Image: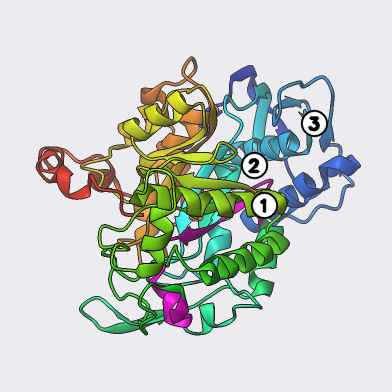
Amino acid sequence: MKTNIIPEPQQIEIESESPVFKLTRLAEVSADERSEKALSSFYRFCKKAFEISFVGTGKESVTLCVRGSVKEKEGYRLTVRENSALIEGADEAGVFRGVQTLCSLLFQNDCSLCALLVYDYPQTERRAFMLDCSSWFFTPEAVKLFLDAMALNKLNVFHWKLTGDCGWRLELFENYLLTQIGGYRAFTGLGKIPHGGYYTRKDTEDILRYAEERFITVVPEIDVPDRTTAAISAYPFLSCDEKQVSPATDFSDKSAVLCLGKESTYDFMFSVLDEVSEVFKSGLVHLGGKKSKKADRRSCPHCEEKRLSLPGQSDEALYSDFFNRLSTHAHKLGMKAVIRADGYELPENTVCDCRSEEEIKAAKEKGLLLIDSSLDLSKPYGILSVRDCYEHFRVYENAFAYEAILPTQNASDMKKAGVLLFPRLGAFAESIWTGEKKKNFQHFLEKLDDYYRAIAFLPFDYAKKRTAFPGAIKSLGAKIKKQFSKDND
């Protein structure tokens, strides 16, 4: 019997040679009231994968329940005995994770299982994935597929990048021009093809419900104050020179940035945060923070006046003051701000998004909660191998979350995104779920054929062997590594 589960469970014991459980439409499937979401997930999977709708008149049974005997958060115990499969979870999320494992085993073994015991729980609490929808717009249906892929890999935090130079994707009622103007760019690339789109309030609420059903927390990103060309195209008063611009048509740094000296900028940002807090209930909001190399606020009288009034009188002080005011406002709304550390001081009540060893070290020295988001899946496999992803993360003090990111400048559609993500997202998921003691890269490779089947079933494309495990390309990758070393999310 196959037990090729990614991420690898903490404990799997096969207790018989021959199958003792066969899932058919006659199975009686039941759940306690706290396991309804997991039950719905099981029904959906069986309908899609096996075309089974249960009638419950047979001798085999599937039972889902929350039990205090499983202690670890998101932990579960899956027990298969003769004609029965029982999933006991420490909480609702644990039952759901157990269902993902049961579905994987059924999928691999044509619905027939031997007697077995799986005891499992995550080694890290927050396991995150960032999808950039500002560079390229992915439809609501596509976003849901990414959430399905997260659930398959037992990831539980969706960092949703919704704004940038090239597009503003989140509909806000008070500032509706952000999507009407900032959601569309004239062209992209040599083909001069227009591109655009945004998520209506209905789209967003539907996606949030979809994520909640899969026990995934959604953290929106409003990228400020520099990667804001799309916002300024809608509201020119936000910039230092107040000139009319259009959403960017390429992904290089831009000079159109928010003015940090005018009070109207803060009024705008406060109104944005007010509406974001009404829609997103995760208690977190990502505020970007990566500086543009083309930002020049020294020529702006408003920014200069503000800079000279601050301790230190530096550009970094401008950024620190900006984020201090935004994080304070977010805190009043019940949200904690997540901000990139890009050479300026962050407020104490924020979470530091770190994308390099230097940033991680600095955050640890300052005692800040940190997110290690240094795993950039937009890089070619010749530079970031599957093994690199598997071995990338280590446990840090003050670690708030571990995150794999997909900037989509080079992933304009689902096919390209799938090739970049898989199998590397599975390697990342196993590294942070399973933990150092149980990780075995060779065993991970042995499980990939069944993993590919599951990914294709979602459906996603994935990197074929020649792409995912390059040989000569590895040496070429070393030569061009500098090209991709800069952060381009």
Q: Quadrant of residue 114?
A: top right
- Disc 2 from disc 3: Cα separation: 14 Å
- Disc 1 from disc 2: Cα separation: 7 Å
Could you tell me which quadrant the N terminus lies in?
top right
Name which of mark 3 and mark 1 comes first in the sequence: 1
Name the spot of residue 250 as percent of width and height, x first.
Answer: 28, 71
Q: How many labels does the image show?
A: 3
Mark 2 crowdedness (10 Å alpha carbons): few <14, some 14-19, many ≥20: some
Residue 215 covered by magenta stretch: yes
219 relative to 68 in the view: left or right: left
Labels 1 & 2 near each other (Cβ < 8 A):
yes
Residue segment shown in magenta: 211-237
Q: Judge depth for marks 2 and 3 and give the one in front.
A: 2
267 and 311: which is toward the camera: 311
Q: Which residue is drawn at 48% across and 39% down?
A: 352
Name the spot of residue 366 as percent of width and height, x first.
Answer: 47, 27
Question: Is residue 125 something one can see in this rendering?
Answer: yes
Task: Please name the residue that numbered disc 3 is placed on.
Answer: 84
What amino acid is labelled 3 in the image? Ser
Is 98 above or below relative to 437? Answer: below
Name which of mark 2 and mark 3 comes first in the sequence: 3
148 relative to 90 in the view: left or right: left
Task: Please name the residue that numbered disc 2 is placed on.
Answer: 103
Residue 63 covered by magenta stretch: no
Labels 3 & 1 near each other (Cβ < 8 A):
no
Question: Is residue 2 something one can see in this rendering?
Answer: no
Q: Residue at x 37, y 77 (%)?
A: 247
What amino acid is labelled 2 in the image? Cys
Task: Please name the residue that numbered disc 1 is placed on.
Answer: 45
